[in-house]
Amino acid sequence: MPQNAELPPKTRGLTAIAGAMSLIAVLLIVQIWLLSAALESFLAGKRSSALPAAIFSGLMFLVCFGLYLFVDRVDADVRHSSADQ
Amino acid sequence: MKWLGRSSSEPLWKEEFSVRTADERYVTRRQLTKFLVLTSFGMFVGNLWILFRSWFYKPPTFPEQTVARVGEIPVGGVKLFTYPTKDDHCILVRIAENKHVSYSQKCTHLSCAVYYSQESNRLECPCHKGFFSIADGSVLEGPPSRPLPKILLEKRGDELVAVDVKVS
């Protein structure tokens, strides 16, 4: 089985981006669930769940944003390294 | 903002419209990631909106309204009225000599008008056979999942006055 460092930069880059995207997709699904649960709870008159839901949603957005920066950087690095070759 | 923008000296159009197919895959995946992150931001904004709404929520106040006189309807009898607005139809039932109960007439399933069945002593929705308890408005049977909103009544002299709506 080849080591990660032995793989071509493009393959490594695509794997990293696919992994980050999968993680973002999972976080997004959790966020959608969180929003629908918070809305349902709000409409039912229970207002105590709004704050924790907003905090967790914000944290998940920050993680997603961090992953986006990672994807952006990997994308740029790989394409520039292939352009240099 | 290098950390957010492009780190390349290439013009944007050259990066976005790659000649090589392999490079194009990076662009499309990056764009999809951007779209997903924007959606994530939208979810966060939605949660913030709910938070602000719950912080600035003011419980509704209901006016006082005389709905009937004590002896106006017989035991087992019914009177229909509107409360708190003209569009909110309610039902008042005299279930005992000295006991009146009142509920919103709108079924919590699909908003059909419920009526009082004296034979079975319950409120019934004719549309989808939803049955509610006359004692507290709770669901006895059928598709509704929530009890009927209860109109709180106060007896003032010989008048019954609606003072509040209790939604469980």
Image (cartoon, rainbow, N blue to C red):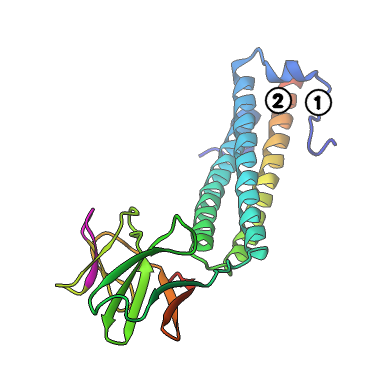
In the rendered image, residue B126 lying in the magenta stretch gets the answer yes
Residue B73, image quadrant: bottom left
- Image coordinates for residue B48, horizontal then vertical, percent: 66, 55
In the rendered image, residue A69 lying in the magenta stretch gets the answer no
Q: Residue at x 60, y 26 (%)?
A: B28
Quadrant where the C terminus of chain B is found in the figure: bottom left
Q: Residue at x 66, y 55 (%)?
A: A58
- Image coordinates for residue B113, horizontal then vertical, percent: 30, 57
- Image coordinates for residue A81, horizontal then vertical, percent: 74, 26
The reply to whether discs 1 and 2 touch (Cβ–Cβ < 8 Å) is yes
Q: Nearer the viewer, residue B64 or B150?
A: B64
Most extreme residue toward the top, as rendered?
B19
Q: Residue at x 29, y 78 (%)?
A: B94
Say whether residue A8 is visible: no
Drawn side of residue B65 relative to residue B100, left or right: right
Say which residue label 2 marks: A79
Most extreme residue toward the left, as rendered?
B119
For label 2, count other residues whose C-alpha is less than 10 Å away and answer few (under 14), some (14-19) or many (20+).
many
Mark 1 and mark 2: Cα distance apart in space: 10 Å
State the extent of the magenta-drawn residues as a range.
B122-129
Q: Which mark is residue B8?
A: 1
Q: Which mark is residue B120?
A: none
The vertical placement of B155 against B149, above or below, is below
Q: Mark 1 falls on what kind of element? A: loop
Q: Nearer the viewer, residue A67 or B58?
A: B58
